[in-house]
Image (spheres, rainbow, N blue to C red):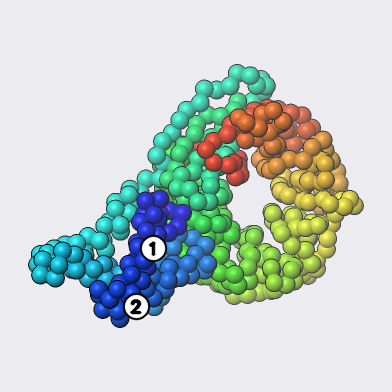
Amino acid sequence: MGPSAPLWMSMLYYLMCTATLLAGVMMLVKGTVRRLYSLAAVLAVPLFFLNNFHTIARVGVDPFDYWQQSLAKGQWWAWLSLALFLYIVWYWGLLVKRIGGKKEGQAWWKRQRWIWVVLAAAAPVIVYWVQNVDDSIVSSVRTYEPSKDNLAEDPSSAHIFFLYSHPLEREAYIAEADWRGMRQLAELKAVGISHISPAVQTGELLLWSDYVGRHVYQLNPDTWTAVRKEEVSAPLSFLSSDGKWEIQSINQDVKTNVVRFKKEGKEAFSKRFPPYVLQVLHDGRYFYVFVDDVEEEHGALYVVDQNGSLVKELPLPTKTARSMVMFQHRLVLTTEPSLTIVDPRTWQVMDWDMGQEETRFDQLQVKGDTLWVSYVQREKSGWIALNDRFKVMEKHELPSVYWEARFHGDYVYILFEPQEGNKADNAGEMNIFQLRTAQLAAKFTVPKQKHNLQTFYVMDEIQ
């Protein structure tokens, strides 16, 4: 049935299909019920099953939920699925009519038929709706005792949020931490969320999925309450919010990403792009949309004005941008295998690398006239500082490869995989370094939860 349908409902669905197929074949052979009805039931079951498989193959999300939306939109396949389901229920009613002999069966059928047919058709939907009627997504919050086994310095007032989830499970977890370690753990009722983005001006968290989830949740981590729950038509590939503009890239299908540009909560316009939209940046005048074109096997930059008109389409030789910023009036992207630098005044494109093979650039941060870039190489990682002419001013190297990194203010937050011997209890090790000196300011272990650790994000303390 799908990741958000309960197990009992999935089992009931498969049991109904199997039982109807077996009963239809038996009645087709014995002729107890008109063979035409039995033949129709035998054909209806695989057709009904294929209709559900069609929803899985098309969008990769919960077929039951997707079917409900498609039914409301009047799509033919959804109504065909409903008609097949009702026929299967009617066929079982016809079989029940034969129980206990013709006369007794007819009398029982006349007394009970409407009650049982309606209950059989509606019970799974009613129970499913009751289970999901509560809009609250936070089911519990657990508080940790602050760790005393840590460095004395308080590097910043920032809070770190770790996301644990599984694409096919109904719950996810967000752990809140600061420089001393873990503070709180919140359990969420949200299917398959895999990313955290900040709602910049409000200090809230945006939770979304690029795999199976079909909701965007806006969560206040101070009170652990859901401020907003928005349904989207398909998983996202990108989401950002700066207070004025919210940008959502919807992974519509294998050939289309639909990017929605919402201004102050209302959709201003939307545009279609080839998949896969990985980054969108707004500089006050234009929107810069980076697409990792899977079919063409290279990247492309689309420039869109605030009215939704396409200003420029610029093919790029690189792909897979993990971050994008505006630095000294130039657009900088951490593409592979080099940094891509675009001058919007001339549309000139240049590449920059460290002169070493197998370097993957990761995160970017602009501080004044300096661009900070994190990177990963074969057996080491680190971060560098570039001036406005893209000359290396500082380089800080770590002796091992990090899992994930985030710049925040004057610090670099580096998440390493757990060390050998600690993997049973820990999901990772967080190290907080000073940006300019690379001095270790704090570190703590990130505990395991029921699901895998997906990502983390750093935000200023909520006032």
In the image, residue 354 sits, relative to residue 426, either above or below, namely: below
Residue in view at x 85 percent, y 43 percent: 393
Are discs 2 and 1 less than 8 Å apart at CB?
Answer: no
Q: Which mark is residue 360?
A: none
In the image, residue 209 sits, relative to residue 416, either above or below, namely: below
* Neighbour tally class for label 1: few under 14, some 14-19, many 20 plus, Cα within 10 Å: some
Taking 353 as reference, is 36 left or right? Answer: left
Foreground pick, 264 / 28? 28
User: From this viewpoint, is residue 155 visible?
Assistant: no
Foreground pick, 313 / 116? 116
Taking 210 as reference, is 98 left or right? Answer: left
Residue in view at x 60 percent, y 72 percent: 255
Measured Cα–Cα span from mark 2 to mark 1: 15 Å
Which residue is tagged 2? 39
Which residue is tagged 1? 18
Q: Position of residue 32 (x, y in %)?
A: 25, 73
Amino acid found under the numbered disc labelled 2: Leu
Q: Position of residue 174 (x, y in %)?
A: 51, 39
Residue in view at x 33 percent, y 54 percent: 128
Task: Check disc 1 and report its element: helix, strand or loop.
Answer: helix
In the image, residue 21 sits, relative to residue 6, either above or below, namely: below
* Neighbour tally class for label 2: few under 14, some 14-19, many 20 plus, Cα within 10 Å: some
User: From this viewpoint, is residue 249 visible?
Assistant: yes
Residue in view at x 51 percent, y 46 percent: 205
Q: Earlier in the sequence, mark 2 or mark 1?
A: 1
